[in-house]
Image: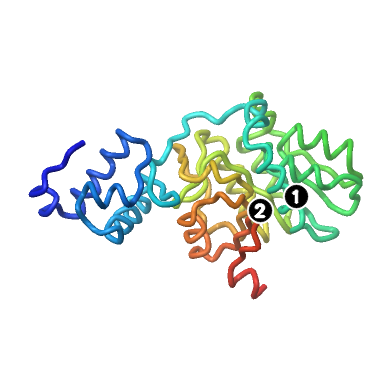
Amino acid sequence: MAIEASERCAMIPAKRQTEIINLLLHRGIVTTVELASLLDVSSMTIRRDIRVLEEQGRVVAVSGGAQLAGRLFKEPSHLDKSELHTPEKGAIGELAARLLSPNMTVYLDAGTTVLEIAHHLVNRSDLTIVTNDFVTAAFIAKETHCELWHTGGMVERENQSCIGSAAAEMIRRFNFDLAFISTSSFDQRGVSTPSESKVAVKQAIADSSHRRVLVTDSSKYGMFSAFCALPLSRLTDVVSDSELPQSARDLIIQQGVQLHLTNSIETNALEVAR
């Protein structure tokens, strides 16, 4: 889409940012160099515009450019999720399991990434484990000797888990040393969900846990849903893969959250200090 030179020169930031959105609507993803050339401004100016738009939740900064933020209207089923990003989830599960110390009381949230954590608890007997996920509970019951609790509550069949106020009430009975929290969407505003019934569960987890660890592959970043479940500031840690965009890494660390990436020695000052 062509933009006249006279219009480019006079363009104020708000107008320029609107043009960036229009370009992304047509192209899906555009590099910083392309945007700078099309809008006749410096790459530094474009990076500032992208940062503003990302703070508004309208775009996601990716390596060398930007793409539109994606809206999640419905979470995939457990079966569908089990076939997505399996290598990344496996590595995340292995890394996250290293955060567990002996004799902890632990919450395992519903989801296939958290299930990968359970796969690294085989034959352990020292943990007290609480979960709302039927698949995870079945695995823990069969493959470990840990004390196991299930939250109960309203059953969400497609995701093989329990949600709603009854599940949240059960969660609040515990004091967790560490909770692993799952999501299908998160951005600069935090963890979101298309299901209002999951909000109470996520908030109960956060309220009842000393350490609150979001486990998520990088494909979930830049996605958002109708309901905000937890702001990033409520988390203590994020475990993800090394494809997580730099803008997401910076955002997480700026919130004072420890960042753990698979296939990477990257950490941050807070993690070293602790």
Q: Nearer the viewer, residue 29 or 101?
A: 29
Q: Pointers 1 and 2 in contact (CB under 8 A)?
A: yes
Q: Nearer the viewer, residue 241 or 257?
A: 241
Q: Secondary structure at mark 2?
A: loop
Kindly identify the residue that appears in the image at 26 percent across and 38 percent down: 22
Label 1 Cα crowd, 10 Å radius (few <14 / some 14-19 / many 20+): some
Q: Amino acid at mark 2?
A: Thr
Screen quadrant of the N terminus: top left
Screen quadrant of the C terminus: bottom right
Of all residues, the one furthest to the left in this rendering is 6
Kindly identify the residue that appears in the image at 41 percent across and 50 percent down: 61
Q: Secondary structure at mark 1?
A: helix
- In this picture the colour scheme is rainbow
Q: Nearer the viewer, residue 38 or 129?
A: 38
Q: Amino acid at mark 1?
A: Glu
Kindly identify the residue that appears in the image at 60 percent across and 55 percent down: 238
Badge number at residue 94:
1
Badge number at residue 16:
none
Q: Is residue 206 left or right of residue 170?
A: left
Residue 124: image location, x then y, percent: 89, 49
Q: Is residue 142 left or right of residue 116?
A: right
Q: Quadrant of the rendered structure where residue 115 is?
A: top right
Residue 253: image location, x then y, percent: 52, 63
Q: Which residue is disc 2 drawn over?
A: 262
